[in-house]
Amino acid sequence: MRQGRRALIREKKMERMDEQNTRLIHISHLHPLYLTHIQPQREQLLAHLCHACHLPCTGQAYQCSQCRYFLHPSCARLPQTLRHSAHPDHPLNLHLTPVYVNGTFACNACKQACSGFSFHCSLCQFDLHLPCAALPETLDHPSHPHLMILRNNSMDYICDLCRGECEVSRWIYICTTCDYGGHVGCFASRTRIPKELYELHERADQERNQQEAMYSVHLQQQARMAARNISRMGSINAVMLTSEPNQYVWRH
Ligand SMILES: [Zn+2]
Ligand SMILES: [Zn+2]
Ligand SMILES: [Zn+2]
Ligand SMILES: [Zn+2]
Ligand SMILES: [Zn+2]
Ligand SMILES: [Zn+2]
């Protein structure tokens, strides 16, 4: 009985490692993936995009020896369900490909058209792409004495760091007490752009800054994913203690 239960639990995992922790079998890819070191060469960042989150891989990453397929170590070990304060009523389930017929989804946090892994609520057609799912729900920013929270922007809002417009229904970081906040990219980067200089920035520059900011918080996001992984392991342990484990099998 105990053996059987363990077998079911093993089927819940999306990945399997060899003993040296270098060869990974992942449900999202046909071939085994190998842990390699990717040199962070700025001009080649786009050549090593992670299949799951579509951000560049630098440093340690899993790579297929036969195709151009990469996964961040943190993206290879994601929880299958996620509870998020932006969607408190339902758990979000991890999907390896978009559930929609056109093969893309619009992330509910950033409104980008995405095609990588997603956390999805089928009841509400709510989707998060991985970089947004991993954003810290509260943020301690050096420019402000109070904790900022992640919230859906419901009105015209001017970012207090770059003075650019924040689009309605995208996420922003905000201190609601002081009505201080703005773009996720600006605040998550911790790089303050002086307000006086904002007029010198072209819109393209602002967008590039935000892209870079999003990338610079990736390590932070990976740490958060790792924390979620730990909590997932905790729930697997909890399942092992119950008499009726959830039977769940991934299929290709
Ligand atoms: Zn990734
Ligand atoms: Zn391959
Ligand atoms: Zn997003
Ligand atoms: Zn929902
Ligand atoms: Zn901004
Ligand atoms: Zn405040």
Image (spheres, rainbow, N blue to C red):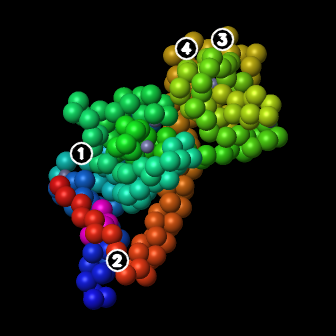
In this orientation, which residue lies closer to the viewer: 56 or 94?
A: 94
Which amino acid, mark 4?
Arg
Residue lying at 40% horizontally and 39% vertically, measured from the top left? 124
Quadrant assignment, res 98: top left
Residue 29 falls left or right of residue 78: left
Dot 3 or dot 1: first in sequence order is 1
**Secondary structure state at the residue bearing disc 1:** loop
In this orientation, which residue lies closer to the viewer: 212 or 26?
A: 26
Circle 3 residue: 200
Which amino acid, mark 3?
Leu
Dot 1 or dot 4: first in sequence order is 1
Residue 218 falls left or right of residue 99: right
- Compared with 186, 93 (above or below) is below
- Per the model, the C-alpha gap separating discs 3 and 2 is 62 Å
Which amino acid, mark 2?
Glu
Residue 13 within the magenta-colored segment of the rendering: yes
Circle 1 residue: 68
Residue lying at 55% horizontally and 21% vertically, measured from the top left? 168
Residue 85 falls left or right of residue 73: right
Circle 4 residue: 203
Give percent across and percent down for residue 84.
Answer: 52, 49
Give percent across and percent down for residue 30.
Answer: 17, 56
